[in-house]
Amino acid sequence: MRSTLPGPPADVGGAGRPAEAAEAAEAAELSEPAELSEPAEAAGQPAAGRRRGGRAVFVATAIMVVALLAGISIGPAAMPLSAVVGSLAAHLPWHPAVAVPSIDSAIIWQLRLPRVVLGALVGSMLAGGGAAYQGVFRNPLADPYLLGVAAGAGLGATAVIISGANPALLPAAAFGGAAGAVALTYSLGAGAGRAGEDAGPPRAAGTASILLAGVAVAALLTAAQTYLQQSHAQTLQSIYSWILGGLSGATWNQVWLILPYVLVSAVTLLAHRRLLDVLRVGETEAGTLGVNVARLRLVVVIAATLGAAAAVSVSGLIGFVGIIVPHAVRLMAGPSYRVVLPVSMIGGAAFLVLADVAARTVQADTEVPIGVITAAVGAPFFLFVLRSRRPRADTS
Amino acid sequence: MISVHGLRVRFGATVALDDVSISVPAGGWTALIGPNGAGKTTLLRSVAGMIRPAGDIRLADRPAGGLSHRQRARLIAYVPQHPQLPPEMTGLDYVLLGRTPHLGYFAVESDADRRICLDLLDRLELADMAGRRLATMSGGEVQRLVLARALAQEAPIVLLDEPTSALDLGRRVDALELIDELRRERSLTVLSAIHDLTLAGQFADRLVLLRRGRVAADGPPAQVLRDDLLSEAFGAGVGVIRTAVGELAVISHRLRPGGPGLPA
């Protein structure tokens, strides 16, 4: 019964597949967009998915570099690109001798660069966390705020603001509120999925109850936050501006503060990219393939939550990034988490840096809330991608 | 190879399995037969570790309860009746999922894993499917692909839940012949639920008839495919006839006598 290949081995899955011509014609409407479909290669060689993944990472990285340079260069005082590059190069060992005015260098190093780097870290955590949540809950509407991160962080921040405590405590309170809310959600939801079954599927019933617990916890904490906010009307302005989110006042200290969480979160999520692909066949089948689904879900949720909580603690509640970036990546580079996770992180960084550039330049005298920009720019971009590609809501 | 003793499974007030004991010898093909709701799928899922019933299950002389997910997936490959098929996944990537129990927690597939899966695709006449997306495949291709994924686990036991329910009669026989060939080639122990009693009798060397969660009969096909046993289990007129070449064929009688096609 051993089959023979229709052509030389190098042709497997390639263009010349006469036996498949009829099926190919039939499936033409369903086939990949032309510029994305590549032939799988012969035995032992990397398949199309890997090459496409490598190219997507490369393209996203190039876009991010452009975004970072634009973010440093554009602002109330325009820095010429030569000054930006020269000033950055001056911090390299064996750097070329470039004369950059010290005032420019100060603007670049003390104002622009920390803001751009912080924006990149925040964007990568929101988008990477969104992709991971969508994978682990197999739900296209999941974002990093799903299990109560936003509500918990909002409550923590509000408590600090109305109490008049040292504003330096605000990031810690937001982080603690976010992480605490997810811990509460998870312990309530996972427990509910387990109770009262004689011989139900082992621990797999958890997903729906965790999501529902997240809705309830978020509603409860938001109610508490709203109550506190309304009963201290004099602080309304500062609470509201924190909730809208933004990167103004970014410092290197904030960068160093969240960097450890960002690194742990990013490395952990990336390490699970293959297991998230296994999960695309469903929790039950993934279990028969040797995956401890409950543990996978817990580890991914912890990692994504650490990253999202760190991001929220320094930037407030920037919406939209966690949903739109992973889906745009899926539409352009396919649904494999080996591609979606890294490219979402890189793309999320680029997207948020560019959104921040817009936030501080569209109005001459004041900054537009960055959440307004992410939605106003992101939504049309996403709709454009959605319409120009075959819709593929394959978050499975 | 598989030994089940005193298995009990309840879903709420419903008793799905009641004191079921079977033993599946190594290298054989044992088929679970019985009417809808008799407990065939529940028994398979219990052996596969998808539900945790009361009672003893031993796999290759090891208590199943003490196995980790990975250890179990190296012993048992499970082919579900309705597999979830990510439409954008390619054939090769899908079969590579079967390598999961052999990979470290953070590892990705090596070239050796890819070689194993490409050889399986070749063996199952799916070489052209390596780069194709699942959404573009036919029912028969998908069915063999799911089988390839299970074989990629390189587990000595293969559980099949109604492996041929989505196929027409010709493809059904093809698929069962393929499973039988693979079983002999690789010395696999096969435990399957099969709805079609005639096919079950032709391919399995042992049948277990389940009825209302209990074992009603257990033995070689000639002992289990009997008019009285089947009629009682299925609650309908069932007849077993022997064909000219000596194979057993199971047919149903009409409730109202006198209709066309009734055997004399």
Image (spheres, coloured by chain):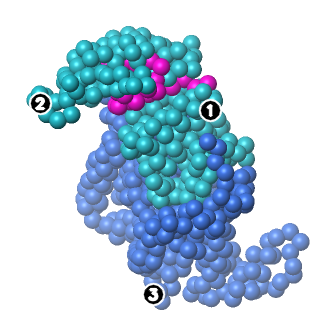
In the rendered image, residues at marks 3 and 2 fall on the same chain: no
Nearer the camera: disc 1 or disc 2: 2
| Amino acid type of the residue tagged 1 in the rendering | Glu
Give the quarter of the figure containing the N terminus of chain B: top right
- For label 3, the residue is A363
In the displayed structure, A361 sits above or below B77; it is: below
Residue B258 circle label: 2
Instruction: Please give the name of the residue rendered at 35% of the width and 47% of the height, measured from the top-left corner.
Output: A211
Rendered colour, chain B: cyan
Nearer the camera: disc 3 or disc 2: 2
Labels 1 and 2: the sequence-earlier one: 1
In the rendered image, residues at marks 1 and 2 fall on the same chain: yes
Instruction: Please give the name of the residue rendered at 86% of the width and 75% of the height, measured from the top-left corner.
Output: A95
Residue B71 circle label: none
- For label 1, the residue is B154
Q: Is residue B44 visible?
A: no
| Amino acid type of the residue tagged 2 in the rendering | Gly
In the rendered image, which quarter is residue A159 located in? bottom left
In the displayed structure, A77 sits above or below B2; it is: below
Chain that is coloured blue in the picture? A
Residue A127 percent location from the top left of the image? 51, 61
| Amino acid type of the residue tagged 3 in the rendering | Gln
Q: Can residue A137 be seen in this view?
A: yes
Instruction: Please give the name of the residue rendered at 27% of the width and 65% of the height, measured from the top-left corner.
Output: A233
How many marks overall? 3
- How far apart, in angstroms, are the residues tagged by discs 1 and 2? 52 Å
Circle 1 Cα neighbour tier, 10 Å, few/some/many (<14 / 14–19 / ≥20): many
Residue toward you, B136 or B87: B136
